[in-house]
Amino acid sequence: MSHPVSLSRDSDIGVIRINYPPVNALGHGVREGLQNCLREALADDDIKAVVVIGEGKTFPAGADIREFGKPPQQPVLPAVIDEYEASDKPVIAAIHGTALGGGLEVALGCDYRVALDSARLGLPEVKLGLLPGAGGTQRLPRLVGAQKALEMIVGGNPIKAAEARELGLVDEVVSGDLLEGALAFARKLVADGAPLRKISELDVPGDTSAELFDHFEQSIARKQRGFKAPFSCIKAVKAAVELPYDKGVERERELFFKLMVSSESAAQRHVFFAEREVAKVPGLDKDTPKREIKQAAVIGAGTMGGGIAMNFANAGIAVKILEVKEEALEKGIALIRKNYENTAKKGRISQEQVEQRMALIQPTLSYDDLSDVDLVIEAVFENMDVKKAVFSELDRVCKPGAILATNTSTLDVNRIASFTNRPEDVMGMHFFSPANVMKLLENVRGEKTSDEVIATVMDLSRRIGKVGVLVGVCHGFVGNRMLHKRQAEAIQLVNEGASPEQVDKVLFDLGFPMGPFAMSDLAGMDVGYRIREELRKEDPDNAPPRNWTDELVEAGRLGQKTQAGVFDYKEGDRTPVPSPDVDGIIEQYRSDNGIAPREISDQEILERCMYVMVNEGARILEEGIAARPLDVDVIWIYGYGFPVYRGGVLFWADQVGVKTIHDKINEIYQQTGSDVWKPAKLLSELAEQGKGFYR
Ligand code: CAA
């Protein structure tokens, strides 16, 4: 490969071009090239100013994350950027695409910045469990003030070129040809004899008070619970206002290196790559042809159906939404509008966008209206007979080549496919509630689903803003199958003597957004109850035995929606409050079943709730329901709020130690003889070989 960085001349302006696809990340070769080209340009008396620009789709989008964790290779990025800042000729960064992380830090080492109007600029290191480690935390506040720098560095979200211009982060925004714009800007600087601008020499403008930092920290404390990086970012920016530049940089480095070796950052980097890796399905040729999806449809205008339809409208794809009863259809459409209006009220979309999106959603009462759709997703009641009726209709009306998907969360996709004459076009698309918010999409491949359909649905997932993970057919697929095991264990722990609030607290403290019982209250206790009752009818031998949660449902305690479930809720308040009534029902259950409650430690709760999931995850891998451990991890992060800084259930298991987990599982199996606790074959093998899921 030719050298990734080159220097050329355009009359008296030197042009340094970075060409290192896909995102011009600042890997070793790029850093070396940037250094050499700058030195060459400075040594050339005919060059009066230097423009730095990225080839392809972007200005560098950051340090090369693949180099993290490996021994650093000279020159390191901060040193390269310092050389740019020390240049005695003006250096202008010409920015397009996404100038992120180390990329933006390079631009901050330049004297001036010119950006294309479509460019975005940001310091997203916090999302990798890091902080900008190449001077970003010291230079950015000197340009935009402490408040804005905190927002950008701690929030990690990029801003648009126009806002960057307003903040003074960018000196000029151009449209059309970026290089031409940057060259013209450089020539004017030379002609005007404009001064060099070394950001490190500036003072931080605006409010730099200690209160500003205290308030900021308080404002993020709840949302960033468990993360390390956001709090280190605040400390680093504070150093920019409290210390001279050189000392501030030292503080930044110190904080950066601590984060770099932290388990949180390792986990977050793992998630970054895992999220991209899930799109690459093993065994599926990446050149598999994909079908065009221009017109979608959703069957069912309930909360789920409406949420699913919104994803398509948000992505600019026309979507029909079908209900059999006019009243239900109107109610569903009104709910969608209300959701959009609420988003508009929060300023996240404009009223015009509300109307554009609503215009893409076409209500219908007739299956015959679906004859032209490219994809249809069924989101009706979880009952096989109902699914049969829907899929027979779809098979009748849909054109050949249309993809017929089901949003079922537990039912057998192969059976659903068998209700049609085109099982190769049928697959599961399991959205998570609320479907317009949750990023996970479990795409379920049936026995006969064609590669073309799989490739199309995986691609479509990304188009509609989801992280699509391909899974196989089994009860509950990957996520709910593991969840059900955890839920059963949580219930069993309460049977034995734990309180629901103790169980919830242990999992909340691990980093889950809520514990298992608060979660079932949120989802509605009747959902699980109905599934259990169905199983008790269909397969009594394998159905879960009755437990105290069945009694709660039968007593009308359905969860948040009735202000009473496992916990009590005050009107308009989602905070779970322990309920004396529920304690009574639990005590009664224990005494009816001859259980003498015992003291249960938090450690036992953690082990039993988590290890049972690890064991099930291993079985899921063994059976090929998920292709790789990373597929399981991505499902838990995006579908159930597993803490990103722990990297997913199986990544977490590796950190605890697979052998430790295996031995505990085996111990419980010996004590209980319960099948659930029989160590998965894969787990035993890994433990024996001293391996982990990833290591
Ligand atoms: N290093 C290495 N590889 C990277 C990368 C990086 N910084 N950023 C993206 N890539 C890779 C991706 O892994 C992906 O590779 P594959 O095609 O092999 O899967 C490829 O580039 C394309 O990425 P996306 O699929 O994400 O493409 P996109 O167009 O949707 O998004 C992007 C592009 C906005 C740049 C996005 O990739 C992104 O957000 N990247 C991360 C940016 C980032 O976090 N930068 C900070 C790095 S840390 C740092 O810079 C520390 C420091 O201060 C010294």
Image (spheres, rainbow, N blue to C red):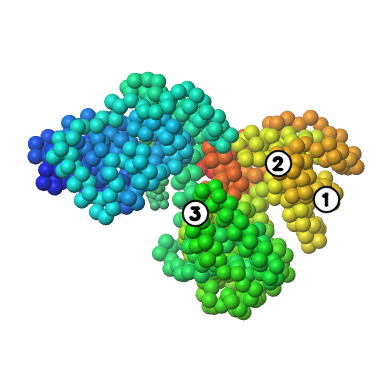
Q: Mark 2 points at which residue?
A: 573
Residue 7 in sight in this render: no
Q: Name the residue under label 1.
A: 556
Percent across and percent down for residue 132 are 39, 34
Judge whether 419 appears above or below 458 on screen: below
**C-beta proximity under 8 Å, tags 2 and 3:** no
Residue position marked by numbered label 3 in the rendering: 350
The answer to whether the residue labelled 1 contacts the one labelled 2, judged by CB atoms less than 8 Å apart, is no
Q: Is residue 104 above or below residue 371?
A: above
Q: Would residue 252 be found to the left or right of residue 84 on screen?
A: right
User: In the rendered structure, which amino acid carries the disc numbered 2?
Assistant: Asp
| Foreground of the two, 411 or 34 | 34
Which element type, helix, strand or loop, lies under badge 2?
A: loop
Rounded to the nearest angstrom, the CA distance separating label 1 from label 2 is 19 Å
Frontmost residue, 388 versus 203: 203
- Out of 444 and 135, give the one closest to the viewer: 135
